[in-house]
Amino acid sequence: MFLRNYLRRLAQEIGRRKAERLDSEFAPLDHKTVFSKIYGQGVWGKKFGQNFYSGPGSHDQTLVAPYVKSVKEFFAQLSLKPSVVDLGCGDFNVGQQLRDFCEAYIACDVVPELVRHNAEKFAAFNVDFRCVDMIEGVLPKADVIFIREVLQHLSNEMITKVLAKLPLSCKYLILTEDIPAQDGFLPNLDKPTGPGTRTQFGSGVVVDAPPFNLKSMSKQIICELQRENSRLRTVVYEFK
């Protein structure tokens, strides 16, 4: 038992150091500049002919298709098509696959160039693309808010600011986070805002656990997908 715990702590420390190296050049920057730089430098990868790329988590159909199916099935339980706010919409590859199942759709990102690009590329989709700072700004209101693999890149201080606004901005939060492959991990270990995630050092964002303690009327896991070394979990939180 001692040896197993020691090896686990050692792996976490090695992972933390790797994550810190990845995030180190972004740590001195404000969060708007962080994400502009991530897209500008193609830190999450590049795709031929595409100026902005949100990474394989938004393009690998083994991850995207089950997510889209699960969200559509949840929407089918509602009495009406929901209005939606997509916070951190990225390159909109996922959002475009859900557009037809929503009423009004507001897609938000903090990177101005990305928002302008999306507005031109997806002009036929009847989407209101907005440059919104989800951390410091006012959130648009809707029936549903999507946050897909965004909080995992933020510091705990910034996550706290976002979560405080959500119960006043939507009825349902559909939240997707990358978490360790096995249960029993220590959630919400802090990190600098940057391209890395907590799974690199054996943690993950769990918004209803300390220090966040998000309160909701109900919680439902609608999709959980295995990745190579982690899980992509999607949870619906219902507010009053």
Image: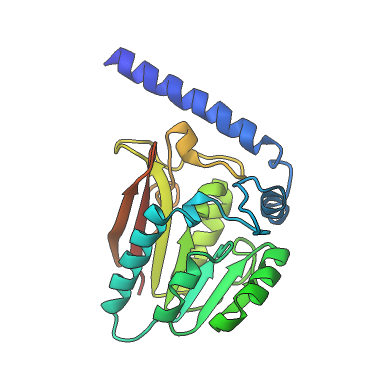
Task: Decide: is 186 above or below 142.
Answer: above
Q: In the image, 208: left or right of 56?
A: left
| Image quarter of residue 76 | bottom left
At 56% from the left edge and 40% from the top edge, which residue is drawn? 191
At 64% from the left edge and 63% from the top edge, which residue is drawn? 136
Task: Decide: is 162 above or below 178.
Answer: below
Q: How is the image coloured?
A: rainbow
Residue situated in front as seen by the camera: 172 or 88 = 88
Can residue 208 be spotted in the picture? no
Residue 132 image position (x, y, % from top left): 64, 69
Residue 33 image position (x, y, % from top left): 73, 53
Quadrant of the drawing holding the N terminus: top left
Residue 84 image position (x, y, % from top left): 46, 76
Residue lying furthest front: 48
| Image quarter of residue 3 | top left
At 58% from the left edge and 63% from the top edge, which residue is drawn? 91
Can residue 8 be spotted in the picture? yes
Residue situated in front as seen by the camera: 85 or 157 = 85
Residue situated in front as seen by the camera: 144 or 229 = 229
Residue situated in front as seen by the camera: 79 or 59 = 59
At 45% from the left edge and 38% from the top edge, which residue is drawn? 199
The mark total stands at 0
Residue 101 image position (x, y, % from top left): 39, 79
Quadrant of the drawing holding the C terminus: bottom left
